[in-house]
Amino acid sequence: MKTVVCIIGSTRSGSTMLDLIISSNPKCASLGELTLFEKRQCGFCDSDCHKWEEYKKMVRLPYYYDAAFNVFKKPILVDSSKKWRGLKERVKLEPEYDYKVIHLVRNGLDRLRFRKKFWGKIEPYVIHGWTRTHNKCEKMRKKHNGVLVRYEDLGKINIIKNLCGYIGIDYEPSMRDFWQHEHHGILGSKTAYSLVRAFHGLSENTDSFVLEHGFDLKPRTGHKFLDKKDLQIFERHGGLKLNKELGY
Ligand SMILES: [Zn+2]
């Protein structure tokens, strides 16, 4: 049976990295943020990707996966579109596949950090949105007997081995060095793809992330930019409670 691995969770959870790790197994292919295929490009090729050109010719929306299996020619596809609602629709429209659901979570303080870095301040609705999305994703995960994985644990071999067991593939050590493999997913995180592109000599200027960190999987965390007031808002609106439930 053909399998679709669906990664669900909040934005900026590290889903592209998890997608690329799983897709580095020879039985799998990355689709990336599939539902955005009309707006975004292939993370590896940019605009001229023959796979997505072929896909656009073949796809008959609202059915997404049939064309993808024909183009990518692997028994397992990895879709990191992240949306729990999208997954619900896919399962209803394309019930012929075996869906494996991975709920990827990340320390809520990291979400706050991104928010503050780009928007300058933290407002309660950001925390409410995070906890609400988490609860919806958990409901979907449980419905499909899926697994929950923490972004911070993606560097651990046992965690990746357990994921492989869940998906039904053999763990291969080179999966952690995901940049060594060619991936053609619709772009999610530019940082994760910058490693792939740099390794294959596709970056015009070596990306600053690669220059700074080298080829390294280590998940990054840090709560700089956050002050006492931000942490109080986080606690008051349920962020701390959820963080504790997740073991942070
Ligand atoms: Zn491509």
Image: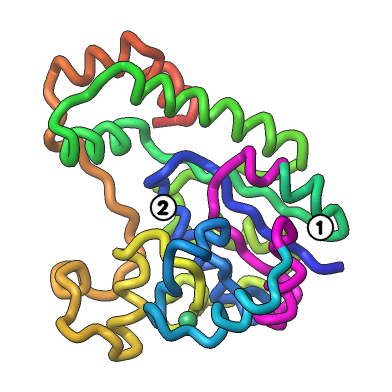
Is label 2's Cβ within 8 Å of ligand 1? no
Closest to the observer: 223 or 89? 89
- Please determine whether, in this image, residue 192 is positioned above or below residue 128: below
Is disc 2 placed on a helix, strand or loop?
A: loop
Is disc 1 placed on a helix, strand or loop?
A: strand
Closest to the observer: 96 or 152? 96
Which of the 4 quarters of the picture holds residue 233? Answer: top left
Q: Which numbered disc covers residue 141?
A: none
**On the image, numbered disc 1 is attached to which residue?**
98
In the image, which residues are magenta? 61-88
Which amino acid type is shown beneath numbered disc 2? Gly
Which part of the image, by quadrant, shows the N terminus?
Answer: bottom right
Residue 158, horizontal then vertical, whole percent: 55, 58
Q: Is residue 13 left or right of residue 94?
A: left
Label 1 with label 2: CB-CB less than 8 Å: no
Which amino acid type is shown beneath numbered disc 1? Asp
- Extreme residue in the bottom direction: 201
Residue at position x 15%, y 82% in the image: 205
Is 83 colored magenta in this rendering?
yes
Number of callouts: 2
Residue 164, horizontal then vertical, whole percent: 66, 63
**On the image, numbered disc 2 is attached to which residue?**
14
Which of the 4 quarters of the picture holds residue 238? Answer: top left
Residue 137, horizontal then vertical, whole percent: 60, 35
Structural crowding at the residue carrying mark 1, measured as other residues with C-alpha within 10 Å and reported as few (<14), some (14–19) or many (≥20): some
Q: Is residue 121 visible?
A: yes
Q: Is residue 201 left or right of residue 91?
A: left
